[in-house]
Image: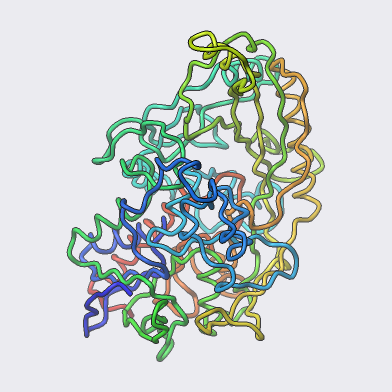
Amino acid sequence: MLQVSVAKEPFDAVVVGSGATGGWAAKRLTEAGWRVALLEAGPKITPKDFTEHVQPWQLTYLGQSPVIRRERPIQSLCYACRESNYQWFVNDLENPYTQEKPFHWIRQRVLGGRSLSWGRQAYRMSELDFKAASHDGYGDDWPISYDEMVPYYEIVENYVGISGQSEGLPQLPDSVFLPPMEMTCGETILRDKVREKMGRVVTIGRVAIVTKTHNGRAACHYCGPCEQGCATFSYFSSPWTTIADAQRTGRLTLICDAVAARIPTKDGKATGVAYIDRVTREPNEVRARVVVLCASTLESTRLLLNSNICNQNDALGHYVMDHIYQGGASGTMPALEARPWAGPPQRPNGIYIPRFRNVKEKETNGFIRGYGYQGGGSPTFDMGASGFGAAYKDAVRQGTWNIGITAWCECLARKENYVEIDPERVDAWGIPILKIHAEYLDNEKKLWQDAREQGAEMLEAAGAKDVRLNGVHSVPGFCIHEIGTARMGNDPRTSVVNRFNQAHEVPNIFVTDGACWVSSGCQNPTLTMMAITVRACDYMTIKYATKQAA
């Protein structure tokens, strides 16, 4: 275990989880003068552990170690889990969970959590998302509005650095942007033809990677495998940004290898967090006046369920959501076959097609809500070409241009999609595990099917040939956008936390990660999670200005 000195007096706050939201909580609270303990279930890492420049042929198993498949059968399904970084992902044998129906729970236990390997796509939610129930009558509105969130989006964006292009769309509000990355020829053809023939927008992806020096981080140099770490810190990850800032205040105590087990309470208030040393298996406890849960959606809810708190109304654990995706199409661009590749070969970004379904007040297409596409166009290299020297290099570049788009579709919040504690199973540290009950139903499947058909139409409008529909949709969890289970709301009878992420039942507990979400939208959620965390922390520092959490 990382050796730290734990103060005898209670901390002002203990933050559970060191990922995107936990890093922001640590930064915001320490910079406000709070003494904070940050718990991370996994080990500490440094840039020396990065492998972004290690090529597959330099590895023993060329990137696919049998150890990964044996110890991490679920984690190995993730595109980012490789021989070069698999230690960042949980060992599924040590961290089991019960699947009532297929659910792929991708987890990383390491300093920085999934901020080490996230896809970095960063999109704001809109008023259409926060007030979706008012728009179409299904479910519940968020107890906050887009206008309330704007200042917090701006705080996060100005700090993180979001590369992108303004488009002026109400359903996908613009961020504070760094210069956008360039599109390829195939992507610009798609953009122009889709706009001309269908009136839809195709834009470059909005991504948390800096394209010029920003807050001491160097511009991306397009080396490619971001999920293996970034020595220049060009993409946003909490250890080298928010957590580093918190450490510089001198008020952060970082405790790694600390597996949170439960939240002790006394007189209706949390007294801290009990945890187990990941290495020695010894029990420990951190005392604090405020507990901030940023452990990731299902881990935060698991901690509350195992503590038997915040569940008087039976809302805790319910309404789990994850975007359904892999609905789209792909094809070739014959108009570009004679054009050699001349762009950056490892651009860590793609294109984005914002939601266009059910945006207008009265619009309906046999389903509610919508989806947005991500994708890209680039050539394949003709590795079978013959020749030698410059002529051979030219021949290799004359490959087929491919283009494809895949939709991320909204998942409706349903109470029957839920998690609970499995009374018969525990993990390697003796902590009861989750049993997950979640599936996609008709609305998600209709969105997915429509996304396939519309994707094909857009590619054909751009002149693509050999257009093929994507075949199978994802299972819940596989999108790695799990949200819900400790939802935000004004009514304590139907929600777990209030509009400032404060637990109704235990008021000195705050849940600021994806667990607090009311509806999923179709955008990647991390930017909004970080903005929500900043807002909640600012509320804490005002409410508990005297540092006496009462």
Quadrant in the rendering for residue 372? top right
Q: Residue at x 73, y 62 (%)?
A: 102
Q: Residue at x 62, y 73 (%)?
A: 315
Number of numbered tags placed on the structure image = 0
> Residue 538 at x, y = what percent?
32, 60
Q: Residue at x 74, y 46 (%)?
A: 368
> Residue 95 at x, y = what percent?
56, 72
Asked if one can make out residue 122 in the rendered structure from this viewpoint, the answer is no
Q: Is residue 198 above or below residue 277?
A: above
* Nearer to the camera, 114 or 482: 114
289 on left or right of 125: left
Residue located farthest toward the bottom when viewing the structure as drawn: 267
Q: Is residue 529 above or below residue 164?
A: below
Q: Is residue 421 above or below residue 499?
A: below
Q: Is residue 376 above or below residue 297?
A: above
* Nearer to the camera, 202 or 154: 202
Quadrant in the rendering for residue 383? top right
Q: Considering the image in quadrants, where does the C terminus appear?
A: bottom left
